[in-house]
Image (cartoon, rainbow, N blue to C red):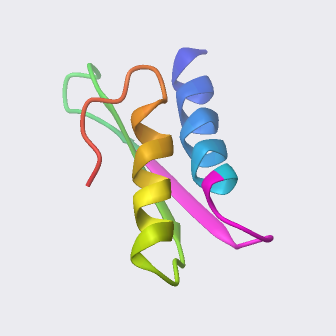
Amino acid sequence: HHTLEFQHEAVEATRSALPGDRRIQHRTRLSRNGTYLSVTVTATVVSADELRSVYDALWHVGGVITVL
């Protein structure tokens, strides 16, 4: 299913942007009408450069509309 693939891609993009083996948690939520899938990925970053790397990686995931 495409939502599982999107979720996996978002998590893997985050993982690939961070050095080492960081603990990454995630949760998902469908919009009220089921149109959009929100994926919240939580990871510890230790610098602004790491955060920028994560944001850049997430923007390259197909279907991403917003990165916060």
Looking at the image, residue 59 sits to the left or right of residue 31; the answer is right
| As drawn, 23 above or below 3 | below
Magenta stretch: residue 22 in it?
Answer: yes
Looking at the image, residue 23 sits to the left or right of residue 38; the answer is right
Looking at the image, residue 42 sits to the left or right of residue 17; the answer is left
Q: Nearer the viewer, residue 36 or 42?
A: 42
Looking at the image, residue 60 sits to the left or right of residue 36; the answer is right
> Which residue corresponds to the image point at 26% horizontal and 19% vertical from the top-left?
35
| As drawn, 57 above or below 36 | below
Q: Quadrant of residue 4?
A: top right
Image coordinates for residue 30, horizontal then vertical, percent: 33, 34
List the single residue furthest toward the left. 32
Q: Nearer the viewer, residue 50 or 30?
A: 50
Image coordinates for residue 59, horizontal then vertical, percent: 39, 36
List the single residue furthest toward the top. 1
Image coordinates for residue 19, horizontal then vertical, percent: 72, 67
Count of labels in the image: 0
- The residue segment tinted magenta is 17-28
Magenta stretch: residue 57 in it?
Answer: no
Q: Quadrant of the N terminus?
A: top right
> Which residue corresponds to the image point at 19% horizontal and 32% vertical from the top-left?
32
Q: Quadrant of residue 10?
A: top right
Image coordinates for residue 62, horizontal then vertical, percent: 46, 20
List the single residue furthest toward the front. 49
Q: Quadrant of the C terminus?
A: bottom left
List the single residue furthest toward the right. 21
